Amino acid sequence: MIKILYFARLSEALGISSEEIEFSVDSNSIDSIVTLFRDRGEPFDSAFCGETKVLVAINQEMTDHHATIKDGDEVAFFPPVTGG
């Protein structure tokens, strides 16, 4: 299993803050997970479309969308944060 966390506007848009998904060799990268989410349709498609910037961390370490995931990982998605 992979634990997925959604933060800030993503959590609000999706109506959930976390979920667990089954790990598979076919979904062993962030890109493949995002494709899986987009295939769910709305609101996931809009939240993870290429026009929307989404940052990602695996096991609390920032990474990019090409990173590999393994069974038991925690993956967090969140929008860029700005401050003043």
Image: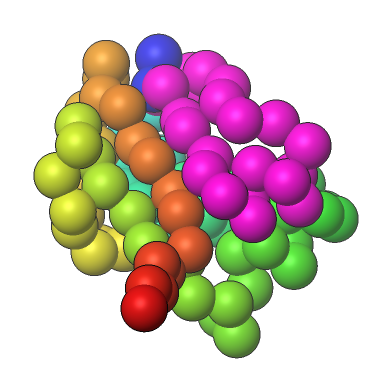
**Residue nearest the observer in this picture, 82 or 60:** 82
Quick check: is 19 in the magenta stretch? yes
Q: Is residue 37 above or below residue 80?
A: above
The C terminus lies in quadrant: bottom left
Q: Is residue 54 above or below residue 5?
A: below
Range drawn in magenta: 3-23
> At 70% across and 31% down in the image, what residue appears?
16
Question: Residue 29 appears at what percent x and percent y?
Answer: 31, 48
Residue 56 seen: yes
The N terminus lies in quadrant: top left
The picture quadrant where one finds residue 43 is: bottom right
> At 20% across and 32% down in the image, what residue appears?
59
Q: Is residue 72 above or below residue 41?
A: above
Is 72 left, or right, of 19 in this rendering? left
Is 43 left, or right, of 72 in this rendering? right
Residue 39 seen: no
> At 48% across and 63% down in the image, what residue appears?
79
Q: Residue furthest right?
A: 42
Q: Residue furthest bottom?
A: 51
> At 57% across and 50% down in the image, what residue appears?
8
**Residue nearest the observer in this picture, 36 or 25:** 36
Q: Is residue 70 above or below residue 80?
A: above
Question: Residue 21 appears at what percent x and percent y?
Answer: 52, 22
**Residue nearest the observer in this picture, 28 or 62:** 62
**Residue nearest the observer in this picture, 77 or 84:** 84
